[in-house]
């Protein structure tokens, strides 16, 4: 998995999530550049921010939603392809009432 070039990893993340969930909208941000020198970055793992909107999250708590995302990512989370994943998982109704988190 770590042989996937970093530039192709956001597309891999999108593909896996679309295969596992019914997605209304998805934003994937590669934040790896902000973690230069970090142990996970040196090992080749990337840092990514997700904002995912899906009806599949209805009636679920935050932890359950995150588990769905981690399950969809599979082995990419267990090797050095993805070192850190920040997840904002919302239902469509929640997304309408909550603007996207602002990056610094």
Image (cartoon, rainbow, N blue to C red):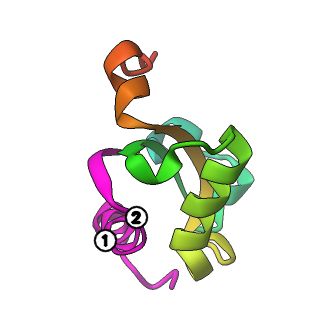
* Classed neighbour count for the residue bearing mark 1: other residues with Cα under 10 Å, few (<14), some (14–19), many (≥20): few
Label at residue 89: none
Q: Which mark is residue 15?
A: 1
Residue under the image location 46 percent in, 15 percent down: 104
Q: Residue at x 53, y 71 (%)?
A: 73
Specify the quadrant of the image occupied by residue 21. bottom left
Span of residues in magenta: 1-30
Q: Position of residue 55 (x, y in %)?
A: 39, 48
Residue 45, visible in the rendered structure = no
Residue 93 in the figure: left or right of residue 58: left
Query: What residue is shown at x 35% (from left), y 75% (from top)?
Result: 19
Q: Is residue 26 visible?
A: yes
- Residue nearest the viewer, comparing 58 with 18: 58
Q: Position of residue 94 (x, y in %)?
A: 43, 25
Q: Quadrant for residue 41, please give it.
A: bottom right
Q: Residue lying furthest front in this view?
A: 59
* Residue 64 point in image, percent of width and height: 69, 52
Residue under the point 40% across and 44% down: 52
Nearer to us: label 1 or label 2: 2
Q: Residue 37, position in %: x, y?
A: 64, 46
Distance between the alpha carbons at the discs numbered 1 and 2: 10 Å
Is residue 43 one of those drawn in magenta?
no
Q: Nearer the viewer, residue 91 or 29?
A: 91
Does 24 lie within the magenta span?
Answer: yes
Q: Secondary structure at mark 1?
A: helix
Q: Secondary structure at mark 2?
A: loop
* Whether residue 86 is situated above or below residue 101 in the rendered picture: below
Which residue is the site of mark 2? Answer: 21
Total numbered circles: 2
Earlier-in-chain disc, 1 versus 2: 1
Question: How many residues crowd mark 2 within 10 Å: few (<14), some (14–19), many (20+)?
Answer: some
């Amino acid at each position: 998995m770590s042989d996937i070039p970093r530039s192709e990893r956001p597309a891999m993340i999108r593909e896996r999530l679309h295969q596992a969930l019914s997605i209304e909208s998805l934003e994937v941000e590669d934040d790896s550049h902000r973690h230069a020198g970090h142990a996970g970055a040196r090992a080749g793992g990337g840092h990514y921010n997700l904002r995912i909107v899906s009806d599949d999250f209805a009636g679920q708590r935050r932890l359950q939603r995150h588990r769905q995302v981690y399950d969809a990512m599979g082995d990419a989370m267990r090797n050095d392809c993805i070192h850190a994943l920040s997840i904002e998982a919302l239902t469509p109704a929640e997304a309408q009432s909550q603007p996207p988190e602002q990056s610094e």
